Amino acid sequence: MTFERLSALTKLVREYECHKMPDENVVILISFDQLSELRAMCLKSMIFTQENKEYFMGCEVEMVHEHDYVAVAYARDEKCYKKQEVKNE
C-alpha cells in the first residue's frame, strides 16, 4: 500500500464518519494482501482487534476476496452500501 493510498483511505474514512447517520457504521472492505500492508504501515493505536474484530481508525475491517482491493462503505443491518473504492495510484 502506497502512502498516497493510505492517505486517501484515512481521508475517505473521515469523510464517511462525518456524514453517517446515527444507525450506520463505517466499514473498511479490504483484501488480505492490502490488510497486511496496512498493518505494517500503521501505528498500533490506528489498527487494533477487539472481540475478534479488527478495526482501523475505529471502523470495522471486513476481508474481501478480491485482490488489491480497499474500499469504504456504510453498513446497516449487516449490509454494506455506498461503497467507494480507494484506487492504487
Image: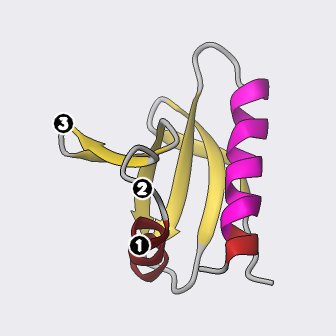
- Tell me the kind of residue under disc 3: Glu
Q: Which mark is residue 1?
A: none
Asked whether residue 54 is drawn in magenta, I would say no
Ranked by sequence position, the earlier of labels 2 and 1 is 1
- Front residue of 65/12: it is 12
Asked whether residue 11 is drawn in magenta, I would say yes
- Front residue of 76/61: it is 61
Q: Name the residue under label 3.
A: 51
Ranked by sequence position, the earlier of labels 1 and 3 is 1
- Tell me the kind of residue under disc 2: Glu
3D distance between C-alphas at marks 2 and 3? 14 Å
Q: What residue sits 58% from the left and 16% below the top?
A: 23
Mark 2 in CB contact with mark 3 (< 8 angstroms)? no
Magenta residues, as a range? 6-19
Report the side of 5 relative to 44 (left or right): right
- Tell me the kind of residue under disc 1: Ala
Q: Name the residue under label 2.
A: 62
Report the side of 45 relative to 10 (left or right): left
Q: Residue 40 carries which label?
A: 1
Measured as percent of width and height from the top left, residue 26 is found at 58, 37
Ranked by sequence position, the earlier of labels 2 and 3 is 3
Mark 1 in CB contact with mark 3 (< 8 angstroms)? no
Circle 2 packing at 10 Å, graded few (<14), some (14-19), many (20+), is some
